[in-house]
Image (spheres, rainbow, N blue to C red):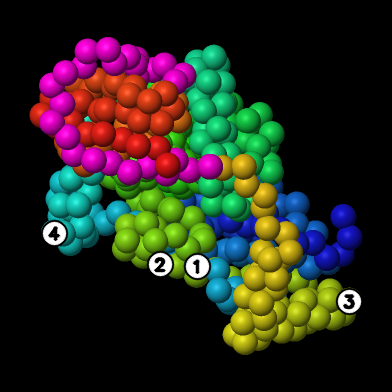
């Protein structure tokens, strides 16, 4: 390594479960709970080096090692926003949920949970501390498929998919050592939403969530956060971190929106280190200035225009007609797990959601092959025409 080293604090903490030697202690800002204290005998920070740490979250308060020998400069990291749920002292989950979220928000969330459970044979499982290797491989394969389809649909690239080998090779060990977890929502034995999470002391990071897009109407992402929050409160966690990057559901769930800092740490008495640190600080401030005049947005838009992700995704387009259906003579009944039904599954699950029907009561009849169908529930029938 050279004299100047730059590190990613946030992702090293959350995904690699490691704190850099420059930090002696870390406390949560909202309750002063200590989440990290360095081993006094382990101090490998080279005093003559300049260390720059990106993405230091504002919900942490740091104490630095060898502080009397160092200069520490904190520079805001503009336009990177994180979202979290601070878990304050409460008697239990119901009490916490009531105190932190509005009545309408609670009602909508429970409506999604109730609707999903009314339409499917739903179950939930948290893999934390133990997972079978075969089951692990199956779930990670399902999560990879969900992510691929979701970002193909959005015509966007995805850093998690680009670095999938890292997650695949490290997560199994991390689950069994309680550094990571997989939370899964099932319909029967089929995973329909999976969240890969990381654990550092009393912080739960929701890192890689995705869902089967055929179930889009059921808001599985919100159900997943609801269930994970319930688990975190029950397990006495202090913070549920939804990580950085704006998404509307994160904003709705967060009771704490946090920012990030750059930390530049260097020796007081080294002229070369002081020069390099000063240059780094000026570059960071210049970068912040360009962000204030939206140069970063211009670059992002240009990249999006010239390097737009090619998509092979084709969403089903269909229309529905209400009908009275009593006669299924001469019509083929389809098994809902048949490959012939694969392309109309979204339409099928939309039907269940809108009409509050259970999947076990659903019968599907093919009127015109691959074109027209009749969905029959317990109380409602509907004609579906694929466009």
Q: Nearer the viewer, mark 3 or mark 4?
A: 4
Among numbered discs 2 and 3, the one appearing first in the sequence? 2
Q: Is mark 1 on a helix, strand or loop?
A: strand
14 relative position to 219: left or right: right
Q: Which of marks 4 and 2 is in front?
A: 4
Among numbered discs 4 and 2, the one appearing first in the sequence? 4
Binning the other alpha carbons within 10 Å of mark 3 as few (below 14), some (14 to 19) or many (20 upward) gives some
Residue under label 1: 81
Among numbered discs 4 and 1, the one appearing first in the sequence? 1
Binning the other alpha carbons within 10 Å of mark 2 as few (below 14), some (14 to 19) or many (20 upward) gives some
Residue under label 2: 257
Q: Which mark is residue 272?
A: 3
Binning the other alpha carbons within 10 Å of mark 4 as few (below 14), some (14 to 19) or many (20 upward) gives few
Kindly report the distance in space between the C-alpha atoms of the residues bearing marks 2 and 3: 38 Å
Among numbered discs 1 and 2, the one appearing first in the sequence? 1
Can the viewer see residue 126? no
Q: Residue 103 carries which label?
A: 4
Measuring 52% from the left and 28% from the top, which residue is drawn there? 142
Measuring 38% from the left and 25% from the top, which residue is drawn there? 368
Q: Which of 97 and 305 is in front in this view?
A: 305
Magenta span of residues: 314-340
Measured as percent of width and height from the top left, residue 314 is found at: 53, 42
152 inside magenta stretch: no
207 relative position to 102: left or right: right
Q: Do the residues labelled 1 and 3 touch (CB within 8 Å)?
A: no
């Amino acid at each position: 390594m050279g004299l100047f080293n730059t590190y990613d604090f946030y992702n090293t903490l959350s995904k690699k479960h490691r704190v850099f030697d420059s930090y002696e202690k870390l406390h949560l800002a909202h309750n002063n709970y200590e989440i990290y204290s360095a081993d006094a005998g382990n101090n490998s920070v080279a005093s003559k080096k300049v260390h720059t740490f990106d993405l230091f979250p504002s919900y942490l308060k740091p104490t630095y090692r060898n502080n009397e020998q160092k200069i520490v400069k904190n520079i805001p990291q503009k336009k990177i926003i994180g979202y979290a749920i601070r878990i304050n002292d409460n008697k239990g989950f119901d009490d916490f949920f009531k105190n932190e979220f509005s009545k309408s928000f609670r009602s909508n969330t429970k409506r999604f949970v109730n609707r999903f459970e009314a339409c499917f044979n739903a179950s939930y499982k948290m893999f934390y501390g133990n997972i079978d290797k075969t089951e692990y491989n199956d779930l990670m394969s399902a999560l990879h498929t969900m992510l691929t389809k979701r970002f193909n649909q959005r015509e966007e690239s995805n850093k998690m998919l680009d670095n999938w080998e890292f997650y695949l090779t490290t997560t199994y060990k991390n689950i069994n050592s309680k550094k990571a977890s997989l939370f899964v929502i099932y319909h029967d034995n089929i995973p329909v939403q999976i969240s890969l999470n990381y654990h550092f002391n009393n912080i739960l990071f929701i890192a890689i969530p995705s869902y089967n897009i055929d179930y889009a109407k059921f808001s599985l992402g919100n159900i997943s956060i609801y269930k994970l929050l319930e688990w975190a409160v029950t397990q006495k966690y202090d913070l549920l971190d939804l990580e950085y990057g704006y998404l509307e559901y994160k904003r709705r769930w967060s009771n704490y929106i946090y920012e990030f800092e750059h930390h530049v740490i260097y020796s007081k008495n080294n002229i070369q280190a002081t020069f390099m640190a000063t240059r780094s600080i000026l570059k960071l401030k210049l970068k912040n200035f360009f962000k204030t005049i939206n140069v970063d947005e211009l670059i992002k838009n240009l990249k999006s225009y010239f390097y737009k992700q090619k998509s092979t995704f084709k969403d089903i387009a269909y229309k529905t007609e209400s009908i009275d259906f009593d006669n299924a003579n001469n019509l083929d009944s389809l098994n809902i797990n048949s490959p012939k039904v694969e392309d109309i599954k979204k339409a099928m699950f939309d039907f269940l959601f809108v009409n509050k029907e259970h999947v076990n009561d659903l019968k599907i009849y093919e009127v015109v092959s691959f074109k027209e169908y009749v969905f029959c529930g317990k109380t409602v029938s509907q004609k579906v025409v694929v466009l």
